[in-house]
Amino acid sequence: MTLSRRALLASGVVVAAACREQSVPSPPDAEAPGPPFTQLVRALGPWPPGSRDSLLIAEAFERGLAPKPPAGVDLASLAPRCLASRRAVGAVDLASLSEPERAFVLDFAAALYRIPDVLAALTGAEPEGSCPADPLAYTRAPG
Amino acid sequence: MPGEAADVCIVGAGPAGAVLASKLVEAGRSVTLVEHGRAFSAEERRTLLENRRRGAEPSSHNHAIPEDAQIAYNPVEASGYTYFQSRVPALGGSSLHWSAHCPRPLPSDLRSFPFDYTALEPWLGRAETELGVAGDADDPLAAPRSTPFPMPAHPRSFFERELLAPACKKLGWALCSNPVAIPSRPFGERVPCRACRLCELCPSGARYSADQIHIPRFAKSANARLLTETRVRRLELDRTGRATHALAVDRRTGSALSIAAKRFVIAAGGVESVRLLHLTERTAKRPPLAQLGKGFGDDVMIAAQLLAERDVGIGLGFATTAINHFRQRAEGGGFKLNAYPRLFDRKTLLQFVTRSGKLAPDSLGSDAKRAVTLVALVEKDRTGTIELDPARRDAHGDPVARITLPFSERDERTLDAAAGALRELAAALGARVLEDGHRTALRIWGAHPFGAAALGRTEKDGVCDPHGRVFGMRNVHVLSSATFPGLGATNPTLTLVALALRMAEALSGEKP
């Protein structure tokens, strides 16, 4: 069966609306979401969810200071829901999470944004730890 | 030289021990410098930096040191004291990761010292030169200087110039230069700051670190003997109170060492110096030092997280300005303020921006650009103690330091006042307070332990004489913030290096 472009777009809108309402995981797509840890980094990071940067950070972060999920929080269940929500509405729907899940997501995001390259991607500033071409840039008005 | 008694054995190769060692060998003295930790190579530092930038581990000097090489201690009644998280047991000590703030003490900060500011002033000037301090003499509270700063202060950030300065003017608080051991122009073998904004791992090498400056100067001398990964367990005293040997252990092999010297200087930090004196004293045939381990204190730091109305720009990794308006309070317990255009605590901001139930990374950037952190460095009462723990022992079987550090009623009043000042400043900045830092996890210990082996005029009021020599131990000195009977809210390193230079001159002038 071949669907028209309009039908494909319409089906996308329906899926997005369903995600908004129910926060159900989206089906696997061409951009493989990766293991649960990577999915959570992609859901919470400041890049488009399919970005390669997110994969590189996820690999380092998992071996680094990433917080571990507490008892009662199942990463394999949580991460796809967060990623689906981010892909559908551009935000992780914290309200749909249980209290321990919500607390863990905030801890995880706080640790993620502590990484200089992640914070730089968030703010557009030169990453901390890289020496800028203009050492007096910090004295100038932003923007 | 191995086997011979050196003129001086220095225990601890942080900035104080390194400066003293370097000056003594320059003066022709033979010196054995003993360090518990190891050296970090340039390659390791690059790896730490790369890891930090990408969130991998280890990403700091401390995280790269295995647990069995850390220094054990037991904090009791100490409100979660985290002293050793701020220490680096390695060659260069805490100067490997410090923020390099180098303010001079105010005359009132030295009120309990057995000498006054005038006596210390020339040494403070020399210490600024040794460390390469950049600053401007614009603090209305500061006492006169006999020498200018070695180089001018770093230019102020957009935030400090356009937002913080007007806010301080509105409040009638002077915003003055915050002197730092980070060159603002080429200085000797050091490059000027390159604004890399990760001072803890200083990618450019501009920030002073003892392992980069004074250790190499020391090590190239024929009079130098450097023992790393060597733990001094105690000094051996003879019947007259004269130390003859340092009893040590090579941590790599576990073999015992006996290090002979004519003089010993304990420069092992504000806690371990006291512990080593305790370990030495308990085997000595002399009455105990009445004041040893008493009067322990530290600074407390509270940090408030704000959200400004507008993008505040970026700053350097350190504050180029400070507010000293509250340094001289009538009841004591002064504090100083610094402000940074960046986040210290990401979770506070996340909790605020997600109160609607959504975490939207795409819009978080504009909030992060408005984040400001205000910090108060608060002088704490000397209400603590350092003793030998009766139960816990280190890897060599020696008792660890047992630390108490309760808050006094004055401490609580001081912290209230500091939190109030942070709120006033936030209001003058027109910023929303997300977290005032008071009575929360952001009320954290500083890294400035002092007082448990204090200088005094007699053994009744101190452990060391005004020159740092231990009462009753004829050839043992202490060079550490442990000897400070107080220092207000002053970062201690400049004062400590001033005392190192003074001690170097005294010991160099002695007949061999």
Image: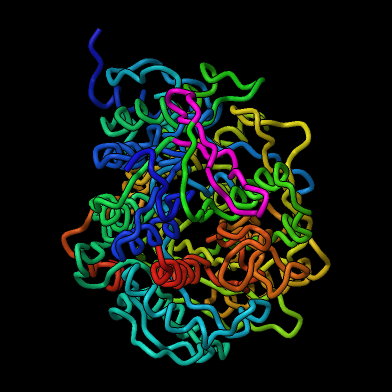
Instruction: Give the percent coordinates (x, y) of residue A70.
Output: 63, 25
Q: Which residues are magenta?
A: B230-256
Q: In this view, which residue lies farthest toward the top? A: A1
Left or right position of B465 against A57? right
Residue B325 in sight in this render: yes
Can residue B434 be seen at all in this image of the molecule? no
In depth, the one of B453 and A95 nearer the eye is: B453
Location of the N terminus of chain B by quadrant is top left
From the viewer's side, name the closer residue of B403 and B267: B267
How many marks can you see? 0
In the image, B10: left or right of B136? right
Tell me, yes or no, whether the highlighted magenta stretch contains residue B239: yes
Quarter-wise, where is residue B71 in the image? top right
Answer left or right for A30 relative to B499: left
Front one among B96 and A84: B96
Look at 46% across and 36% down and name the residue there.
Answer: B230
Q: Which sits in the foreground, B379 or B317?
A: B379
- Percent across and percent down for residue B180 are 38, 70
